[in-house]
Amino acid sequence: MRFHVVKRDNCPLWKKLCLYVLAVAAALGLGALVLLALGVDPVSYYYRMFTMGMVGNKIAYKTFENYLKVFVPLALTSVALSLAFKMRFWNIGGEGQFILGAIAAATVAFKLGPVLPGAVTLLLMCLAAMLLAGLYGAFVAVLKVKFGTNETLMTLMLNYIALYILTFLGETKADWNFYLDPNSVRPIFASFSDIVTFPKIPLVGKFGLNVCVIFTLVIGVLVFVYLKYTKQGYEIAVVGDSVGTAHYAGMKVNAIVLRTVFLSACLIGLAAAFKVGTAGILSTAITDDVGWTGIIVAWLSQMNTAIIFLVSALISMLRYGSTVAAATFSQVDSSFANMLQGAILFLVLAADFYTRFRVVPVQKGGKTNGNG
Amino acid sequence: MEMDKLGVVTTFIHNIVVYNIPLLYGTVGEIVVEKSGSLNLGVEGIMAVGAIFGYIIGCYANSIAVGILTAFAFGALCGLLFAVLTVSLQANQNITGLTLTTFGLGVYFFVGNGLKAVAWPAMNDYSGIKNGFADIAIPGLSQIPVLGRGLFSHNVLVYLGVTIALVMWWYLNRTAPGLRLRSVGENPGAADSVGINVKRYKYIHICLGCGIMGIGGYYMGLNMSGSFNSSCWINGYGWIAVALVIFANWNPALAILGTFVFGFFNTLRVSGSSLAAAFPGPLGWLAAIPTQLYQALPFIITAIVLVVTSVRKREDSGLPAALGLNYFREER
């Protein structure tokens, strides 16, 4: 018996959900086998990882604040990337845009922070980060619409160029280099957290909610509305579906691409400003790989803004939780999170196949059709 | 004194070859994969997986040949995973490749740190590996002054890498299966209609290319004398290889040249200061160039190449037309 694959038009939601849950469960099961091989009880490990060690912990509020610090940049970057992906523009350059945004924000903090009121500085940090990151992204979009330059490869190159600009700033001792700590002989980044930092709103007990979390949620809602209910959002969807159709409908495709990529990169810059403005210091690892992970989150969520928030919450839990769990279970390296994340995604990609396609037996033409 | 200066030059040339041929493996492997129409962004992760298993199993077997074969096999396994997901299950290639990088680096550190906690095999304890990795001088050619030791006295993996590149060039451009493979990368629908088994071609060449990358990873590990610490052996070489594919215009023979160009800058980063010290007059300025510029140069050059080729719309561009697109028969 031979099989062939046919496309299916609509897969019922419950079936989709079942497949995805099954995929994640299978990945966790594989992870459990690895843990068992190491002599670690998978249940207590996973419990520790997914609760991030907060249960019965006196400083659980601190853990949750740290968790949100991981969550905010990832969620916002993923939302930003989904704008470009929806248009089938492969912005792999989240890392580079994030880095340039971070440098811009830090520059404003160092140069204007001491003279301007805090709120104004923070606002200018966000704007500068958005502008620089946006231009870095738009540069690729211009090349794409003008010359058809491959955007996947181009944004990939720009990631590394940005990274080495940042390491240059971080490793070069010089009079002009105000990013570094003047009191240290070895080059280390200077902190500006005593000049300016995003405020926290005290909520329950000692827990303070960073305003960036609120901004991120608001932006998420705005992007959701923008994509679903505005003309521009509709244009993005049409261009993503078929450039030909968009042209035929009289849309200015080039302008739409430029505008959307600029917006996408702007929001990544904003995520960087949030991150830097909260940390109060630059670092060569400032991106925490959100540019890469965000691509995966946006795709896993099928560019649905609400699901992006859910998935980034889970992935952040996985990443942050594994570092917490690594402290208790010393025999399990924190790189376990990367393996688990990979396994989850591979299995979800496989499950995805069954939501889009159906495998049916090949009907032998002569026997079943001809004679029947 | 004069001899000493020439010695610096010889060492410089020698280092260009030794420390950058791993790039050639990654690049040639990725060319083979991309020629089948698949853009695999997992080079970094695949090289890491090949490296860690090749190194460990090679050491336990005390044989560099076993190490090479193991690295190839594990690289090819990663390729198989990529092929199952993108060719059979129609998953997005960019996403699958990036995940392969995350996953591969995860496996690398997980296995490496896990073993290190128990007992890490040190390369010097294994005579088979140490002697197998020693330089072999080519009689005659290696006697040429300055260049001889720089170019013709190397370990077995250097010769193997150059041989693989040349064989792949011949295979792609001078054989019937190579021609069919290129047609799959250009237009799978047309290839399918003349009876080429598109799926089989993609599977075989993705696995083959990824296996070659795996050997490159193993080579990186041996270059680091197998010392395992917090930074990965591959250290971004996989990404440079993705860039080098473009620079080499998807041509394995040109990739050898490209490896030397990228390697030249890469080696200047490390030995620029010793060159500047040996020739303070003409090369003294080398010491003033920030190392980060050398690190960024492969990416800057490739970005320029990308833009220039897209502006000129060259007829002879080696970019496979169907690169990055999955082939689904019913949509032909």
Image: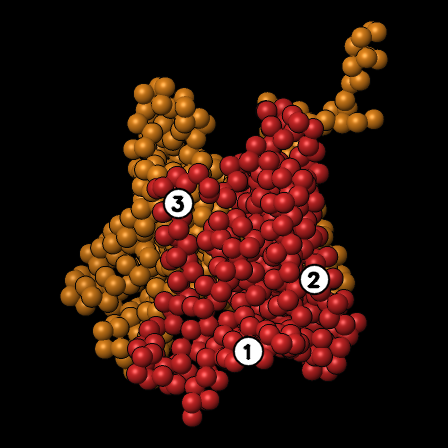
Chain colours: A orange, B red
Give the image location of residue A141, x and y in percent: 34, 41
- Residue A144: x and y, percent? 36, 40
- Are the numbered discs 1 and 2 placed on the same chain, yes or no? yes
Give the chain of mark 1. Answer: B
| Residue indicated by mark 1 | B144
Residue at 63% in and 45% down: B174
Q: Nearer the viewer, mark 2 or mark 3?
A: 3
Q: Is residue A119 left or right of residue B180?
A: left
Graded by Cα atoms within 10 Å as few (under 14), some (14 to 19) or many (20 or more), the crowding at tag 2 reads: many
Q: Residue B32: where, in percent of width, then height?
A: 61, 48
Give the answer, above or below, for where A328 lies relative to B320. Answer: below
Cα distance, mark 1 to mark 3?
38 Å
Judging by the rendered image, the residue that carries numbered circle 2 is B71
Residue type at the position of mark 1: Ile
| Image position of B70 (left or right of B237) | right
Q: Chain of mark 2?
A: B
Tell me if A113 is positioned left or right of A310 in this view.
Answer: left
Q: Nearer the viewer, residue A227 or A3?
A: A3
Q: Secondary structure at mark 2?
A: helix
* Residue found at x 32% / y 32%: A254
* Residue B112 position within the rendered picture, expressed as x and y whole percent measured from the top left: 66, 69
Q: Which residue is mark 3?
A: B309
Q: Marks 1 and 3: same chain? A: yes
In which quadrant of the rendered image does the N terminus of chain B lie?
Answer: bottom left
Q: Do dots 2 and 3 share one subunit?
A: yes
Q: Residue furthest bottom?
A: B1
Q: Give neighbour class at mark 3: few <14, some 14-19, many 20+ (Cα, 10 Å).
A: some
Q: Amino acid at mark 2?
A: Ala
Mark 1 neighbour class, 10 Å CA radius: few under 14, some 14 to 19, many 20 or more: few
